[in-house]
Image: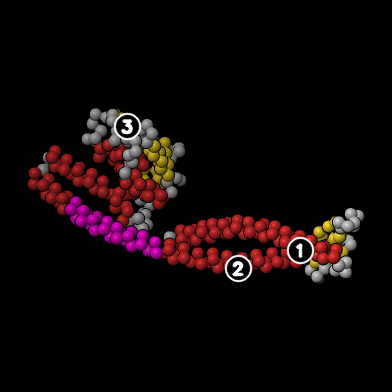
Amino acid sequence: MKLEKVKLYLSLALLLAAGFSFINLTVFLELKGMMEENTHRTAYQHFQMHLLNPEHRGDGRFIITEQAPNNYLVYTFMDPANPFRIVRVAVKEEVLNSEINIFMKRLLAGEFFVVLTLILLYQAVVEMYLKKLREKEDWIRTLMLSLTHRLGNFLAVQKVNLALLKKGVGENPSLQRMEKSLKRAHMDFGIFLNVVKEDRGAERETLSVDGMLKDILEYFEDELQGKRLFLRLKELHTSMDKNDLQDVLYNLVGNAIKHSMSKVHIKLCAKRGLLVIKNDLGLPKGESMGLGVELVRRILRRYGHEMRVSLRKNYTVFLKFKG
């Protein structure tokens, strides 16, 4: 968060600096043009005074000379009474430059205080906005903790009840379906638990991606009935938290199977560290993949992995395992 705020302040400072630099350049060029025009007009006035009074040799800033001295800006005028006589009126260049420099220094000093004030105001607004975001985030996190706690208790009670039923009745297809449904419910909710534990450090371990994919496909045996599954898996390992990898693969595979029409392709390329999941039916135009995919991206971002989802002709996921 601190780094993001520093980036915000730096970006504002750069934008202000670029904007005021453009303004200063425009003001400088306009001011220089006006000063040169005014200087030429004043030099011409001294030339007219010299014609009326040949003893007039200037006022100190402007001098009338026969030859052009160094470091002087010289204006040349022709005597209308004598076309062969040229009158030169000179003014020191530093006089002209000093007036411009004084004005520009005052302008820069004023702009410095304006920029400082704007940055401080911007900082106050950003801090207030971030405070509201933190309060809202804390409220949502508290709500999620409460929901996960209640759901966890509910699932635990159902598992105990199911265990008691199995003990009293024995193995039964209906109980097996109930047990599988409870596991599916736990897996479906697992991705949301990741939001709550996002700030906690992930416990990395070396995991088999291909092995976990095979385990996850068992949860979707019913959905795969009547559909063709093309499975090409190579041995691939990655370093992640086991629950995180399970949540990622479960959601990506589940989306592909649920939104498929007749076939699903799952390919794992070990050399490129790439997992490709594809089905034969993309989502309708304008429909998104929902919250699950965004939560998967947040999990993968912790480990530096990259994911790209294409919905043009099919639902296709490209998951690149880094390292």
Contact check, label 2 and label 1, Cβ < 8 Å: no
Q: Which residue is mark 3?
A: 281
Percent coordinates x, y for residue 275 in the rendering: 39, 38
Q: Nearer the viewer, residue 219 or 42?
A: 42
Image-based side of 119 in relation to 210, left or right: right
Which numbered circle lies on residue 42? 1
What's the distance in space between the residues labelled 3 and 2, CA to CA?
A: 64 Å
Label 3, secondary structure: give it: loop
Percent coordinates x, y for residue 137 in the rendering: 33, 59
- The magenta stretch is 128-155
The verdict on residue 87 being magenta is no
Which numbered circle lies on residue 218? none
Residue 177 in the image: above or below residue 114: above
Which numbered circle lies on residue 109? 2
Specify few, some or many for label 2: CA neighbours under 10 Å numbering under 14, 14-19, or 20 or more: few
Q: Between disc 3 and disc 2, whose residue precedes?
A: 2
Q: Which residue is depicted at the point 39% across and 39% down?
A: 309
Percent coordinates x, y for residue 31 in the rendering: 67, 60
